[in-house]
Amino acid sequence: MQGRRLAVAIHHHKGKGVSVRNPPKMSFSEMNSDGWVSRLKADFLSGGAIIVTQTPANEDGAAVLLLSRMIGKPMWTTVPRRPGNADCLEDIVHRIEAVNTPAVSKMGLPVLSTTASEFGCHTDESYLSEPAEAIALHCIRQASTGGGTILADVRDLVGTLRVCDAEALRGDFPHRSGSACILSGSNDSPAIRYNPYEFSRGKGEVLSTRQRCAMAALDEAIGACAIVIRLDPGDCLILDNRRILHGRTSFDPSDGRLFLRVRLRIS
């Protein structure tokens, strides 16, 4: 599985660690070999993302839960449910698929993960005071065309920002639970919490001109650094939600594309 470059230049990160453009891979079938779990954790922490291939592509969520527990602690987070579905497992393992009637958020807006539309790069739960620290995405069924996974590493993009924009992004930005900076950490080990959709859904009017300009620069940097990879059924991508932004290209909703998602605490 090779990363496909977007129609923009990609800047090469010169720091240490495995680039998100080449996530290490491990096979689920070799899980019982000596040191497998230790290597899984080490490669995840080093590169911010890892793909476990040949993971049983079953809809019950058992395989993705097993892998998630090797990295951290699955989070019990409630998402809008489909009518009639009262299975408590859905609070931990979320189905990511296009449905005829998309789920609606507490703000009364469609949840993009329940549509077939393009979902730009973001980090999960950026509006919470304590967002998920890692995300596991398990491909059960892939679309015939489209449905690619978009990835961007904050370590790649932060060096492309002007100093004034980076400084602005380290200031407080409003979100549903209060306010927080978009960028944090050192230049060598930056962290990010960002979902542009949160600012286009009634938040933008409280942003200053400087903040708007900094966000525009960030969006441009993400576009310049992002890649698209194609996950096949049985591939489970585990990514650091504090470092790796992720998204998805659009696809035909009739293709039956299905991913399972688990959000994690790792600290």
Image (cartoon, rainbow, N blue to C red):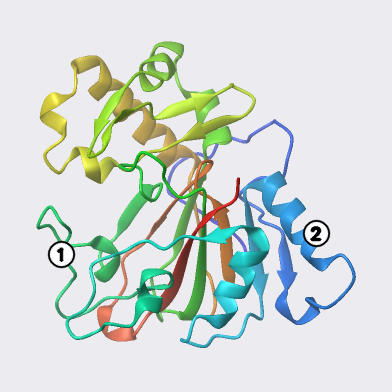
How packed mark 1 is, by other alpha carbons closer than 10 Å (few <14, some 14-19, many 20 or more), is: some
- Image height check: is 110 above or below 153? below
Tell me if I can see residue 215 in this picture: yes
Q: Quadrant of the C terminus?
A: top right
Q: Which residue is at 46% across, 35% downward?
A: 192
Point out the residue furthest to the right here. 34
- Image height check: is 155 above or below 254? above
Tell me if I can see residue 234 in this picture: no
Please tell me in which quadrant of the rendered image residue 178 appears: top left
Q: Which residue is at 41% across, 45% downward?
A: 131
Q: Name the amino acid, label 1.
A: Val
> Between residues 225 and 138, which one lies in front from this camera angle?
138
Q: Name the amino acid, label 2.
A: Arg
Please tell me in which quadrant of the rendered image residue 114 appears: bottom left
- Image height check: is 41 above or below 256? above
Residue 168's x, y, as percent? Answer: 36, 16
Please tell me in which quadrant of the rendered image residue 159 appears: top right
Q: Is 89 left or right of 133, judged from the image as shown? A: left
Residue 103's x, y, as percent? Answer: 19, 69
- Give the structural element (helix, strand or loop) at label 1: loop
- Give the structural element (helix, strand or loop) at label 2: helix
- CA–CA distance in space, label 2 to label 1: 39 Å
* Residue behind mark 1: 104
How packed mark 2 is, by other alpha carbons closer than 10 Å (few <14, some 14-19, many 20 or more), is: few
Residue 116's x, y, as percent? Answer: 27, 70
* Residue behind mark 2: 39
Q: Which residue is at 55% across, 82% downward?
A: 62
